[in-house]
Amino acid sequence: MQLSRDALLKAYRQMKTIRAFENRLHDEIALGEIAGFTHLYAGQEACAVGVCEHLGPKDYIISTHRGHGHCIAKGCDVVDMMKELYGSREGLCKGRGGSMHIADVNVGMLGANGIVGAGAPIAVGAGISAKATGHVSIAFSGDGACNQGTTFEAMNMAVVLKVPVIFVYENNHYSEHTGVDYAVGADSILDRAGAFGMKTFRADGTDFFAVYETMREVIEYCRTTKLPAAVELDTERYFGHFEGDPQRYRGPGELDRIREERDCLKTFREKVTEAKLLDGADIDAVDAEVEALIDRAVAEAKAAEKPKPEHVLEDVYISY
């Protein structure tokens, strides 16, 4: 399926925004500007964008502890996200969520989650609702979550209840610090998903076009049949499991190799310019726009209002 020029520019802008957002966070955290654990998504941009470009605001996604990319791809406001990470009262969740708990139900982003595998059962619940409306629910997970009992139960329940939920496994080859070849006993993550009775798909998660085309088929299948499916996207993360991770589990030159050979932004640029769908100037213009946006987001976040002691009980109790 040939994407229009505008669609190509939008997809690249989304991926570039995620990359620039995460790179800037990496710098700001090193300067001590942002507190708390942060898990960066850089390197996996084609996964989030290739999936979410098919979704509308009433399709649901559930994210993971590495959720900034999913938020941006689903349409969360980048400036408000930055304010949230800076702990501002003006943030997307009033500074209460931070890096691992960003949510915006208005765009169908039901939340990131610090518990590995916790998103899958939530996505099944959302999928039950989506079944009546013709929408879908997507649970983003890493290769580590495929070993969790909650994930197994959720996959089984999705099949039993015939729910249009898609389990997207972003296999970046490391569950925290443990290699996937050691941690996953089956030959592949999809062997497990298929054993529950659902249809399975696989794509190169470092190629936007491979993800986009695969997800077009998957989402059409789930919308039409109202049945679940599972997708494995082979991808890479460019930073550690968390900021400050020394990454001693990496092999010599491993990071240099994957940044050189498996960069989804570089691959996108090469493909669209070689096919004369976009030219280098188009992409350079997007790069400049995005960097300016991130600069503005950081400046506004640093100047934004911080919570006060009297705000501590707000949004904790519901008044009926």
Image (cartoon, helix red, strand yellow):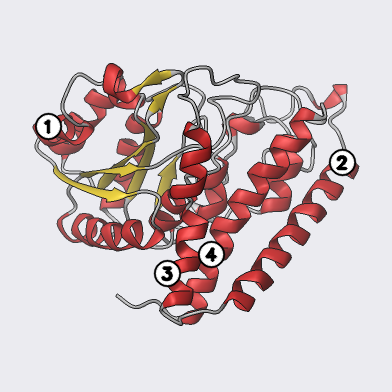
* Distance from the alpha carbon under mark 4 to that under mark 3: 12 Å
Distance (Cα) linking label 2 and label 3:
38 Å
Q: Is residue 95 left or right of residue 185?
A: right
- Where residue 315 sits: x, y (%)? 68, 30
Q: Earlier in the sequence, mark 4 or mark 3?
A: 4
Q: Earlier in the sequence, mark 2 or mark 3?
A: 3
Q: What's the amino acid at mark 4?
A: Tyr
Quarter of the image where one finds residue 35 = top right
Residue 271 bears which disc, if any?
3
* Residue at the disc numbered 4: 12
Query: Is residue 120 in sight in this rendering?
Result: yes
Residue visible at 23% across and 24% down?
153
User: Compared to 174, does 124 lie above or below?
Assistant: below
Which circle's residue, 2 or 4, is located before the other in the chain?
4
Question: Marks 4 and 1: which is nearer the front?
Answer: 4
**Label 3 crowding class (10 Å Cα cut-off): few <14, some 14-19, many 20+?**
some
Q: Disc 3 versus disc 1: distance between alpha carbons? A: 37 Å
Q: Residue at x 73, y 58 (%)?
A: 291
User: Residue 140: x, y in percent?
Assistant: 39, 39
**Badge 1 amino acid:** Phe
Instruction: Nearest to the eye among marks 2 and 3: give it.
Output: 3
Q: The disc labelled 2 sits on which kind of residue?
A: Lys
